[in-house]
Structures are given as C-alpha cells and as structure tokens.
Amino acid sequence: MDFPILTTMMLVPLAAAIACLFAGQASRVIALGATLLTFGLGVMLWANYEIDGAQWQFQEKYELVAGFSYALGIDGIALMLIMLSVFLMPICILASWDAIKKRVGEYMAAFLFMEVLMIGTFAAQDLFLFYIFFEAGLIPMYLIIGVWGGDNRIYASYKFFLYTLIGSVLMLIAMFWMVSEAGTSDIPTLMQYDFPGGAQTWLWLAFFASFAVKVPMWPFHTWLPDAHVQAPTAGSVILAGVLLKLGGYGFIRFSLPMFPEASADFAWFVFILSMIAVIYTSLVALVQADMKKLIAYSSVAHMAIVTVGLFAFNVQGLEGAMIVMLSHGLVSGALFLCVGVIYDRLHTREIERYGGLSINMPYYALFFLLFTMASIGLPGTSGFVGEFLSLAGIYQTSSLVALVSTTGIILGAAYMLYLYRRVAFGDQKNADAAAMKDITAREWIMMTPIAAVVLWMGVYPESFLAPMRADIAALDARLAASAPISDAALASGEPLEKAANAIEFEAHEGEGQH
Amino acid sequence: METQILIIVFAPLIAAIIAGLGNRMLGNALAKSITTGGLFLSAALSWPIFIGFLSGTHTAEVVPVLQWVQSGDLTFDWALRVDALTAVMLVVINSVSALVHLYSWGYMEEDPDQPRFFAYLSLFTFAMLMLVTADNLVQMFFGWEGVGLASYLLIGFWFKKPSAGAAAIKAFVVNRVGDLGFMLGIFGTFLVFQTTSIPEILAASAGMSGSTIGFLGMRLPTMDILCFLLFIGAMGKSAQLGLHTWLPDAMEGPTPVSALIHAATMVTAGVFMVCRLSPMFEAAPTALMIVTIVGAATCFFAATIGTTQWDIKRVIAYSTCSQLGYMFFAAGIGAYGVAMFHLFTHAFFKALLFLGAGSVIHAMHHEQDMRYYGGLRKAIPITFVAMLLGTLAITGLGVYHLGAGFAGFWSKDAILEAAFARGTTTSAIAFWAGVTAALLTSFYSWRLMFLTFWGKPRWIESEHIQHTVHKTPEEAGEDTTGGYHPHESPIAMLIPLAVLSTGAVLAGQVFAPSFIDDAAFWAGSIFYNENLIHALHDVPYWVKYSAFVVMVLGFVGAYIAYIAKPDIPAKFVASFGWLHNFVFRKWYFDELYDAIFVKPAFWFGRQFWKLGDVGTIDRFGPNGIAAVVQRGSVAAKTIQSGYLYTYALIMLLGLIAAVTYVLL
C-alpha cells in the first residue's frame, strides 16, 4: 500500500459525516456511498494483507506530544473485526432508509462517526488513542438510542451510560499505571511486557470492569436488552454486530497478552460467570414476549461462549471465540434486521402479534430460518464453526465447563425455534400481520450478503481463520506458560488384551448353517 | 468411481436448491421432476457401487472435496468416504428416497406447496448422504444435524397445525440433547486421539483401551466414556428409550416423510454410527453393555406401546422404535454385520408399511384412526397385498429347515441367535427381551392388519368420512360405510409399494450370505466377529425356532382378540385398566418430561428475569444508583438528560490528565 489506507478508511466516513450534517434528505445517498466506499477500501485492505507477513501491517505513526502518538496498524484479528464493521455499515444505512424520518442528516452523521471510531478502535496501536476511540465510539450510540430510539429511550441510554462509565474510569486509571511502569503507550510493546504478578491482578480487574460490561457478561448485562429494545433497527445491528465485540477484542488484545498470569488466575471466575450466563440468559430468553429482548438475551448467552473460548488458553478456544464473535456479529445483526423488517410493517415487536408469516412472506421466512439456524449453530453455518472450536477448546481445559456451556445448544434451539414457530408457523391469527407483503428489493439487498457470508464462513472458514492464525499462535505461545491445569487429562494404561465382544468358539456337530 | 460418488451426493443438493429457491416460479411439475430425477439418478449410480462391493471388485475410496477447518491441531475437511458400510447405506437411502419422491407425486397431489416439500425431501437426502460418507466425526455431525433440520422442516411441513409446529420443535430439541453427548464425544475424542479422522481413530482405539481420562472430576476409562457420550447422540437420533419421545410425535409430518426419515433412513443413523465406530466400541466393554441394555429395553418397551395405539402411523412408529432397539443390542453384543443387515431389511419393509399406511390414509380421506377402518381389503386390494407382505416381513415369517423366509426372518432371527450365542448375562437379557418383543411385534402387526382390512367397515364413525359423505352415523343407519367408496391409490403410489414389496420378500434371502457370513464383503469397514458368527449358526434348534413360535402365538392372539372374539380387548381394558393406561399413555414419559424439564425451564426463566434481572441486578445496580443520585440532586432531570455531557467531560478530563501526565 503506498497510501495510509487505515487513515483513509477513517477519513472517508468522517468527511461524509460532516457533509451529512448539512445535507438533509440527500444524506442517505451520501452515507450509503461513503460506507460502500469504505467497504471497498476494506476489501483492498484484506486483499493486501499478507497472511505470512509481519504481525503488524499497514502501520502509520505520527508522534504527537511526548510519547503519545497517532499510531495505527492491524494484525489479522483487527483486520477481521474491521471487515465486520465496514461490511455491516452499508447494510445499516439501507436498514434506516425508510425507517428514519426525523433529523436524517444527524442520524446518518452519527452512524458515520461511529464507523470512524470503530475502525480507529480496532486499528489503534497507542494505548490512549485506543482509549479515545473505544470510549468515544459509544457517544454516537447513546445519541442513536437517545434521539431516534423508542418510548423508553432515556432510561435505556442512561443504563448504558452508567454501566460503561464505571468501567471506563477504572480502565483509564489502569492505563496510566501501565504507561508509567512500562514507559511506553505502544500496544505491541505492551503486549510483550511482563508486568509483575501482583500488579497484573489489579490491572486485569480494572480492564475487566470495562470489557465485561461491553461483552456483556452476566451480571453486567442488564443494559443490553433495554438498549436493544429502544434502539432503532440499525442501532441494534451495530450494537450487536460490532459494539459487543469491543469487549471480546479487549480481552484478546489487552487482558490475555498483557496479564497472562492474572488471566489464568481469573479463568475460573470467567468460566463461572459464563456458565451462569449460558443457562440463566437462555432460560430468560425462553420466556420473552418481545422479539428484540429475546435476541438480546440470546446474545448474552452466545457471548458467554466467546469468553469461555478466550480463557480456554489454547488455539481452538481462541480461534473459536473469534469466529463466534464474527458469526454472532453477522447473525444477530441479521436477526435484528429480520425483526426490523416486520417492525417496519406492523410497528410492534410483540411476538404474539405475528404468526403464520411463512404463508404471506415465504422468502422472509426463509431468511429468518437461515439466521435462526445459524444462531443455534447448525453445521454448515458460521455459528457452528465458532461454537464447535470454542467448546472443543474449553473441553481440553475443563470437561465440566464444556458440558455446562454445551447445554447452550439445547437451550438455544429451544428458544429460537419457539420464537420461529410463533412468528413463522401456525395460523395467521392477525389480519394485519397476514396482509404484510414479502420482503422488498431493498431488504433483499440487505439480507442476501449476510446470508452469503454466514454460509461461506460455515463451509469454508479458512478464509477467515487464515489471517488470524499466526496472531493466535503467537498469543497461544505467550499464554502457554500460565495455562490452567486441565481436568480432562489423559493417563495412559495397559490396553485390554482383546476386543470387548471377543468370544471363544468350538464347532459342534450337527446344527448346521443358517 | 469418484465422479459417481460426487454425483450421488450432490445431485440431491442441487435439486433441492433449484426446487426450493425456484419454488412457485418453477411450478409443481418441474420442481417435482428435477428432485425426483436427481434422486433416481443417485439411486441408479448407487447400486453398481453396492454390487461392486458385494462381488469384491470395489475397494474403499475417499474423495476429497474441500478444506473445512484448520485450527491448531484440530483439522477436518469435507470428504466423501465410500466403503462397504457406506455402500449399504447409499443403496438404502437413495432407493427409498427415490421411491418416496415418486410416491409423493400421488400422495401430495393436492397440496398447494409441493415444490417446498420436494426440496425438503431432497435436502434431507443430501444431508443423510453426507452423514454416511463422512470420513471424520465432524462431517458426520454435519450430516447428523442436517438431517435433523430436514426432519424439523418436514415434521412441521403443515405448519398451520399447532400440533405440527410443536412436534417439529420437540424433535429438534430432544435430538439436541443427544447431540450434546455427540459433541462432547467428539471433543473428548479429539483430546485423546488428536484427530477427528474416523480411520485414524479406529486404528488407535484398541491401544487406548486401558487408559483413563478425567471427566467432571472423575477418572474414567477413556474408551468407555467416549463411546458412551457418542452413544447418547445415537440414542437421540435413533429414538432409544429416554430420548424416544419425539418419534411418535414426528408422525405429524406427511406420511412419505415418516417412511423415508422416521423409518428407513434418518432414525437408523445411530445404528450406523455405532457400526461405523465399531472398533472403537469394541475397546469399551462398559459402553457396549449400556448399548445392549438400552437396545433391549427399547425393543421391549416400544413394542408394548405399539399394542395399544389406535393411530395407524403411531403403531408403526413405535414398531420402528422397537426394531431400532434390536439393531442396537445386536451391535452391543458385537454382531455389527447382523445389525446392519436388519437395518437394511427393515428399511424395505418398514418403508413399505408406512407407504402402505399412507395409501390407506389416502383412501380413507386422511383418517388415521384404525377404529374407523375395517374391511378394507376388498376396497383397496393392491395396498392390502403390499401391507400383508410388509407384515409377513416384519413378523419374520420363515422356516429354518426350509431355508426360506421373508426379509425379517433372516435378519431378526440372526439377531436373536447372536444374542443367545454371545453367552453373557447382558446378552441373555437382550435375547429374552427380543423374543418377548417379537411376540408383541407379531401381535400389534396383525392387530393393525385385522383392524384395517378385516371385519366390518366402521367408516361412518370417522369425522373425515362424515364430512365427505355429509352424513352422521345416525343418518347412515345400517350402512356403516356411510356410502363412502375408498379408492385404490394412483399408479405413482403403487409402483413404490410394488418395488418395496419385492424387497420385503427377497432382501433377506438374497443378501443374508453377504451381510452375515461374509467377512470379505465388509472388508474391515466394521468390526467383524468371526467367532460370534460361527456360534450364531451353532445355537440349539429351540433358539432358532423361538422367534417362529412367538410369531405364531402373536398372530393367534391377535386373531382371537380382533376377529374371533372382538369383545376381548374391551374386557381386558376393563379388568386391567391401570396396566392399559400405563401402556396406552406411553409409560407417562411425556408427562414426566413436561413436569421435570419443560415446566421448570419456563418457571426458572421467569424467576431469573423478574427476580434476578429486574428485582436484583437492576434494583441494586443502575436503578439504585439513579435513586441515590436523584435524592441528592436538586434537579434530577438535568442529570438524566445531561449525562452525555457529563460523560464527555469525564473523558475529556481524563485525556487532559493523560496528556499532562505524559508531558510532565
């Protein structure tokens, strides 16, 4: 690359965002064009990423003030998350095309600002630069919920704010300490720095306070259902698709490589919270009457599979966690789009108001089915690959955690199919729901790319695993020394002498052949 | 062979995609032709491969397709493995599927949604083929879940009926309980063998038989725990005792689906899995004992229920469950070839029975209750003959000294003989359970025949018939037919019946020498227990005739109860009401599971939500903080709307602090 592509990818939406503030109705087209252009740049980024090349690529660095620098650069992990963000953005703009009527310019600007900040978060190589992007990225989200959200939007964004604030303050303090200890704010250097064991514990907890809320882990999850319910469709897509990934990204970029010993010490703490999350939030999802709440709770359960995978301390767990994050970003985003499609028509998220949609909206029912199946991890979809690797990883560390987490495949099937049955199956009990038209061309354009990537990631995940392989291997190597003891270890023994059903036979006379 | 294998597996997928996405744009005839054509092509290509293995000219082959996952040491690819065991499954799956496709031309004639139905059928076939051609455990799991999806879609095909939607979910979720075991089994297998490749695992299994592994804090024999976990998966898919509750409900699906998925193919996947992994199971004595006991218990338990049900399809469904039990205990005692042989013959006669029942239901205007049948043998003679042959096959008519018999005679008797010959306590239990189940099988099969085809017509009592002839039973008076004229089914439905009838009559006789006695045929694709096969032929005559005797007893019992003295069943119910209720209500499994799983799940869900999230976390978390803040604040509203600025301010202050810190 002979131009600073990462900065360009941030400048395009930034310029468009400023233009949108003044463009009024035309901002839809500007936003769509800018996000598509950014996506195009993203494709170039991926195409030019050298899988066997340096760990950090496309690096840019400008010293600002004494040590604090504008430093960008990505590894395979960041690449994949940036791709997820720029892929979902144009879809979000399309999803808001007709649904947003008031203050369209500001709305589009908010989304574009958010894109800038998300790319920045994943690309930042300076601790403080990361902090700015990481925290500022949430401001457009507050606005989207607070201004364009539903009736109870103030409460929802307030909750979001409160949870996030406490974590942020602790993380910032921890960052100061780290910079003074290590003498640099350069993230790649910090990833190799060995902090003293006692300090690791406190630093880990401070970062955990911030990341656990973003993931969200039980019991820091209650902001999520409210935020989703109140957010407009596209807001939910980005919230589920990208913002929830900030927590997982934080763990994989900071907590694990920077504080490996503390991570190992806290692994069981994470496992216990994750196991509770899988069971607890799945059961809560089962009894929801509001579609968005149901999918929001299912997100918490899915993200718990990410956290168990991350703290499994092996390659399968880490790669599985990454694929679950990518897959969940696509699938739950798509599920929120599916809710949005019918919400736009009937203006209710209440499950009981629908029914029998397979009759009047067959193609909608097909997409919804595909994403439902991907959500419950059907092999051949992206959901399976991630879940399978993540759980295979945790099994090597603890068969108990694996067993409890794997019950998620049963509970997940129960609540998702129960949802699907109430929406798509059964009789058309409501005339207005029965009169709804099948998906429009715009909605086809939104859903088809996600469906294609979900299947692609399910059948040939190598495309997504390959760029991350070296980075995960490096992380795994760094973690190896402090990995927790496995409870599923094999102990060899003397093999049995013969097969279980081996019997002696002596021929008798007479009774012949069958 | 490579190209043929690729066509066999992918033709159904391509047909399913075209028919499914084309749907109404294609029109019924085209969608049906493409899918049915694809399946006949696959079937036509499968038989030469099977015959090649029979004659010993083919050897096992693996066709690589695409890389799938590579994560550290955990790698698995898409590949199609065809050996003797797979070849057997290929002919079973593709033949039955092709015939069921053809049959559905007639059976689904009036359905408004035919392309979708045929697309699902073909999709199912593809998934099933992926399952049986799997070269690694994960692809097997792909097929496993794929058939689960197709089964879900087809059970719920008539999704407007609430009962169909419920049955579809039940099938999927109960299967997922089994899949939990399967997945953990795969994880454990990878942990132990560092691979998911089936041939590599099987080669290394014996060497691991003495090792132990940690599981949930316990130290357990490695192979036993792995095989047990995998077997839980098999129990789910093959509807074994405990995880069987979904299968009878699955009868909500159209009858061709029941024949293909819930009789001939998908439900046998568990048996296939145990046979495929037989060298692994042979290193796990305790797991095999569990397989034997579960199989034996299921074959008895399901047969008891079959004797009391009124719905013709449910009788056959419980019969399937019971026959699968036979296959499992055959595998459990080490007679894998015999288990596969029963799977093979069962596919023909059970598909025949289901399609025959479908033909009866078609003739009786969708009435499925046998209480409203009667005297149908003259009205639908071809269906009658087909059902008769199917019944003779399942009850196992055949005489040892003549060396002749229907399909079931060859395979079921071999299972019983092997169980006897195996000579352990467990195998003896299995033998007696099998003999008792054979008695019950004969009874419920003939009960079905007598209620349906013999006696006086009782048609007018059926609501379906009443709607058709527009008469009440009172108006019809003496004429209990109500003036209804059942019609024989169209030719598209009769051809499959004829083909399957041939199979039900001949499959045992023709293929017994290869499946049971020919180690060379299996060529190492299953664990072949030479000594057990010798011992099986060497059992006493009373063992060889035991199945025949109980079959006759069952027939006589059914004849007395349903033809000679038809008031006997009512008297029995009157005097043994508790027993009848227990069996009729299916041993109360559904009620039990509802009380201990389903209801508590919803209850806990509500408690966690209302008491946990809202009542505790929110109350003491964000709402609590809000309350404290509001109490101390003059204008609460400013804070609520001003938090964004507060936030931005804190961030800004933080940054200024950062910069200052760095600068100093």
Image: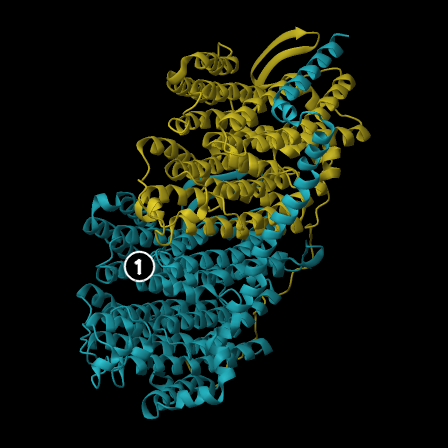
Chain colours: A yellow, B cyan
User: Residue at point 26% right, 52% down?
Assistant: B113
Instruction: Quadrant for residue B641, please give it.
Output: top right
Instruction: Quadrant for residue A156, please give it.
Output: top right
Q: Please, what secondary structure does the residue beneath circle 1 have?
A: helix
The image shows residue A335 at horizontal and vertical percentages of: 45, 39
The furthest residue to the right: A198
Instruction: Quadrant for residue A308, please give it.
Output: top right
Q: Is any atom of residue B104 visible in this view? A: yes
Residue B553, placed above or below residue A453: below
Left or right: where A155 falls relative to A48: right
Left or right: where A261 falls relative to B209: right
Q: Nearer the viewer, residue B304 or A95?
A: A95
Q: Chain of mark 1?
A: B
The image shows residue B471 at horizontal and vertical percentages of: 21, 75
User: Residue at point 49% right, 38% down?
Assistant: A332
Residue A108, placed above or below residue B254: above
The furthest residue to the bottom: B565
The image shows residue A466 at horizontal and vertical percentages of: 51, 31
Q: Nearer the viewer, residue A380 or B645?
A: B645
Residue B616, placed above or below residue B388: above
Residue under label 1, please give it. B97
Quadrant in the picture for the C terminus of chain A = bottom left
Q: Is any atom of residue B137 visible in this view? A: no
User: Residue at point 37% right, 72% down?
Assistant: B316
